[in-house]
Image: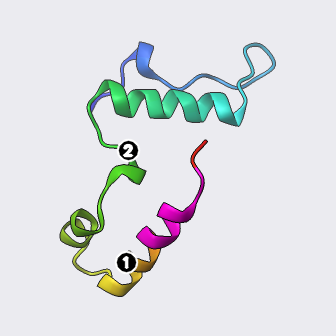
Amino acid sequence: MTLTYKSRPPKHGRRGAKSREERTEWALDQLTKYGIKQPDTYTADELKYLNPGVPADFIDQHIAKRNKKPTV
């Protein structure tokens, strides 16, 4: 993916200062715009397939912890 001028993250400086939340929102919008799955949407089986070097037990624990978190 090549970043064009219009798809660059918002600048942070005196003029046009952007908060961390605004930059995060921009980044997630870019994922959606280009059809990239968001990290919290992968299933345990997908993560195990995509990350064969990571122990399956660790992935299962991570998914269980992630699923317990309340969504905003």
Position of residue 51 in the picture relative to residue 22 (left or right) = left
Q: Which residue is mark 2?
A: 38
Q: Is residue 60 left or right of residue 24?
A: left
Q: CA distance from mark 2 to mark 1?
A: 18 Å
Q: Position of residue 12 (x, y in %)?
A: 70, 26
Point 42% across, 68% down: residue: 63
The image quarter containing residue 42 is bottom left
The residue that appears at 38% across and 44% down in the rendered structure is 38
Q: Secondary structure at mark 1?
A: helix
Is the Cβ of the residue at disc 2 closer than 8 Å to that at disc 1? no
Q: Amino acid at mark 1?
A: Asp
Label of residue 60 in the image: 1
Q: Is residue 69 above or below residue 41?
A: below
Residue stretch rendered in magenta on the structure: 63-70
In this rendered view, identify the residue nearer to me: 8 or 57. Answer: 57
Color style of the picture:
rainbow
Give the mark nearest the N terminus, 2 or 1.
Answer: 2
Amino acid bearing label 2: Gln
